[in-house]
Image (tube, rainbow, N blue to C red):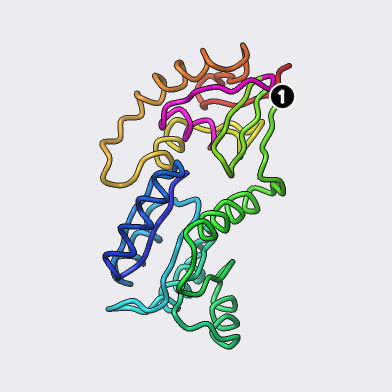
């Protein structure tokens, strides 16, 4: 899962980036509204954490322009102004959730998880596909109830597929959503991680759809 973090305070941005990365997300950063607008219009993100008080171009303007351009990624708004009026304005501009500063990072992570789930029509934080289960709160993965140890890349890959069970996902899409912009993106490495992940899951849990990509299916 790939997140765009837009925050002009370098200390807070570094803290949030570290927390999001630790939670298993690929994170892109923007420190001002102009950079955020460009990234949001040109890169695919599973969610955005957007501060409203940005230099160059304010967060509300960025959000409105994303929505006008048809960009539908879920957006969590951050602001230091905890008033009902600011919340209404932010939601009406296209925001999906709202968090006032100061906040606990655990709450931000929980809200991001919920936004990503809802965007895929999933209600529970516990994702299941056949014998495979992934707890989005703890990052714990089990097969037939037994814990499975995954590397960070394997976890990102499985989490993306678990949010889209039964859906064919191309290598290009996986590459775009598993790596941040500054990462050396080689779609061939996806095959390597799929092969490694397959060895830890039930046989045939990840299908190869020739010429199209991969699909996670429910197998006992």
Residue, x 35% and y 54% (percent of image)?
17
x%, y% of residue 64? 48, 75
Q: Quadrant of residue 204?
A: top right
The answer to which of 219 and 174 lies nearer the viewer is 219
x%, y% of residue 31? 28, 67
x%, y% of residue 105? 47, 59
x%, y% of residue 213? 51, 26
> Label 1's element?
loop
Residue, x 50% and y 50% (percent of image)?
46
- The reply, left or right, for residue 133 in relation to residue 17 is right
Find disc 1 in the rendering and name its residue. Answer: 130
Is 200 situated above or below 125? above
The answer to which of 91 and 114 lies nearer the viewer is 114
Q: Quadrant of residue 166?
A: top right
Is 78 situated above or below 154? below
Count the marks: 1
Query: Magenta includes 80?
Result: no
The span picked out in magenta is: 144-159
- The reply, left or right, for residue 148 in relation to residue 152 is right
Q: Residues within 10 Å of mark 1 (few under 14, many from 20)?
A: some
Residue, x 47% and y 25% (percent of image)?
150
- The reply, left or right, for residue 83 in relation to residue 179 is right
The answer to which of 124 and 183 lies nearer the viewer is 124
- The reply, left or right, for residue 16 in relation to residue 143 is left
Is 219 situated above or below 33? above
The quadrant in which the C terminus is found is top right
Query: Magenta includes 151?
Result: yes
């Amino acid at each position: 899962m790939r997140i765009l973090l837009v925050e002009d305070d370098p200390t807070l941005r570094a803290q949030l980036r570290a927390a999001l990365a630790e939670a298993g997300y690929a994170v892109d950063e923007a420190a001002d509204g102009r950079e955020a607008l460009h990234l949001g219009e040109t890169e695919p993100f599973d969610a955005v954490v957007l501060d409203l008080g940005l230099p160059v171009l304010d967060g509300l303007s960025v959000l409105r322009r994303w929505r006008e351009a048809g960009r539908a990624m879920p957006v969590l708004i951050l602001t230091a102004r905890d008033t009902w009026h600011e919340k209404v304005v932010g939601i009406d501009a296209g925001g999906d959730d709202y968090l006032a500063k100061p906040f606990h990072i655990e709450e931000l992570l929980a809200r991001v998880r919920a936004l990503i789930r809802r965007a895929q029509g999933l209600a529970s934080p516990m994702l299941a596909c056949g014998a495979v289960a992934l707890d989005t709160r703890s990052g714990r993965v089990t097969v037939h109830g037994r814990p499975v140890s995954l590397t960070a890349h394997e976890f990102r890959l499985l989490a993306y597929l678990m949010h889209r069970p039964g859906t064919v996902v191309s290598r290009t899409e996986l590459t775009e959503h598993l790596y941040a912009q500054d990462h050396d993106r080689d779609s061939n490495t996806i095959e390597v991680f799929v092969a490694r992940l397959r060895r830890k899951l039930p046989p045939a849990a990840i299908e190869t759809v020739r010429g199209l990509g991969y699909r996670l299916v429910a197998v006992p």
